[in-house]
Image (cartoon, rainbow, N blue to C red):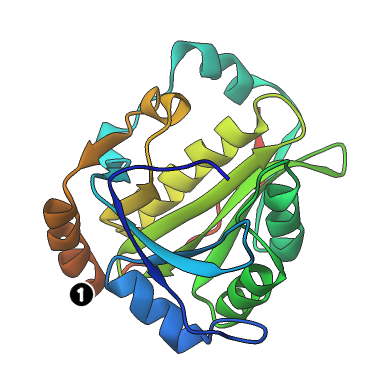
Amino acid sequence: MTVFTREIIVYLPKMATFIPTKELLSLYGAGWFPMACEDGELRLFSPDPRGVLPLEGFRIPHGAKGDLEKAGWEIRCDTAFREVLAACADRKETWIDERIVSSYVALHEAGQAHSVEVWKDGHLAGGLYGVRLGAAFFGESMFHRVSGASKVALTVLVNILKAGGFQLLDIQWVTPHLRLFGATEISKTEYLGQLRQAIKKQAHWTNPPGKMG
């Protein structure tokens, strides 16, 4: 697993199969998120600085505009949540194990987690998933099987969040790829302030039109 710096790590209590939904939402509301580590432990992370993608500062890089304009993208939400998790986990180094999957599937069934799916020719081409709490959305992971599909998913997500009145898009850590879209780092203190405000607000999730391009 990639080693991240400047973060606070605590251990989760031993749990047999999953993190209960109420406890998981409480963790997010306090600025924490879980990851499964190589040693088999589930750990909580609260990075400092924290990665966010300001919704009003979102931009589409020049190189991604062609991907968005390609014909044949079909957009769906929440029709293949477990498949999206499995695809995000299908990589050499992953923090998504069966405990994480079962925990987030339970969140999804409770209406607190969503997937944005990009389909092409009837196949799942890419997507992402995350958690919602009040007017905050916590992006967890994304993937692509067809070039450009994850960029489409991210753009669709931002449009959904803007339309629904969301205030905070948490991305945990900033990568060079996400920085191209406007992602930035803020201090943990500033993040927690934004988080407290966002989770007090109400937002709604509206499914986007089915076709792009």
**Residue 134 locus on image (x, y percent):** 31, 72
Residue at left offset 48%, top offset 84%: 13
Residue at left offset 36%, top offset 75%: 27
Q: Residue furthest top?
A: 62
From the image, which quarter does the C terminus lie in? top right
Q: Quadrant of residue 179?
A: top left
**What amino acid type is highlighted by mark number 1?**
Lys
Secondary element at image label 1: helix
> Can residue 79 be seen from the camera position used here?
no
On screen, residue 147 above or below 5: above
From the image, which quarter does the N terminus lie in? top right
Q: Quadrant of residue 124?
A: top right
**Residue 189 locus on image (x, y percent):** 12, 56
**Residue 139 locus on image (x, y percent):** 46, 53
Q: Residues within 10 Å of mark 1 (few under 14, many from 20)?
A: few
For disc 1, the marked residue is 200
Q: Residue furthest front?
A: 39
Specify whether 104 is left or right of 161: right
Residue at left offset 17%, top offset 58%: 194
Q: Nearer the viewer, residue 154 or 25?
A: 25
**Residue 47 locus on image (x, y percent):** 30, 52
Q: Quadrant of residue 85?
A: bottom right
Residue at left offset 66%, top offset 74%: 99
